[in-house]
Amino acid sequence: MKGFNILLVFLLMGFCVFAQEKTSKSDKANVFGAWVDETNVGTSNEMMSLYNGLSANDTLTTKFVGKVKEVCQAKGCWMKVELSNGNEAMVRFKDYGFFVPRHIAGKNVVVDGLAFVEEMSVEDQKHYAKDAGANEEELSKITTPKKTYGFEASGVLIKN
C-alpha cells in the first residue's frame, strides 16, 4: 500500500507539471500588472482620436501601443506615453499596485486600462515635474491648470 501511495504522489506531481501554462520567461519579465493581450491594440494616432471624443469625467476601456517619453525617476510610479501631434498620455497604475522600470524611456509599450481626460492642477503638475527631476526654475513656470490625457493602466507590456 505504501508503494502505491508513493506512486500516486509522483503521478499527481507529473500531471501538475504538464498542466502548467506555456509562457516564456521573457514574456513574464516584460509584463507589469495584469497580463496584456496584444490583440486589438490601437496606435497612438487612434488613441488621440479617441481622446478627442472624450469630455471630462468620461472613461473608455482600451489599449494602445506608444513610445515612452518619460518615467518617474523616484520609483517608476508613472510614465508619459507619446500620442500624435506632440501630445502625451500620463499613465498611472491601477491602485498604485505596480511600477515599471525607470530606464524604459524610448521603448514601446502596450498599455491596457482606462483612458480619460482631466484638468490637472498646478500642484499635481509640479509634483510630477519634481518626480521627473525638474529644477526650481522649471517648477516656477507652472502657474495654470491644464487639460491632460490620462490613462489608468491595469497592465503594461514592454516591447523589445
Image: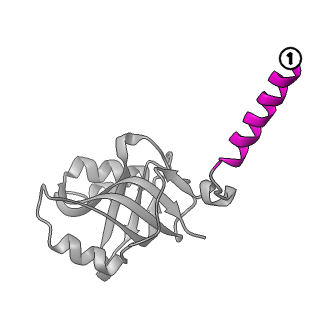
Our reading of the magenta stretch's main secondary structure is: helix
Residue 104 appears in which quarter of the rendering? bottom right
Task: Report the side of 7 relative to 13 (left or right).
Answer: right
The residue at 84%/24% (across/down) is: 4
Q: Does the segment drawn in magenta span residue 9?
A: yes
- Name the image quarter holding the N terminus: top right
Q: Position of residue 144 (x, y in %)?
A: 16, 58
> Which stretch appears magenta?
1-20
The residue at 44%/48% (across/down) is: 77
Q: Is residue 102 visible?
A: no
How many numbered discs sit on the rendered protein? 1
The crowd level at tag 1 (other Cα within 10 Å; few <14, some 14-19, many 20+) is: few
Give the residue at mark 1.
2
Q: Residue furthest front?
A: 1
The residue at 36%/46% (across/down) is: 94
Q: Is residue 114 visible?
A: yes
* Numbered disc 1: secondary structure: helix
Please tell me whether residue 52 is drawn above or below residue 14 in the rendered image.
Answer: below
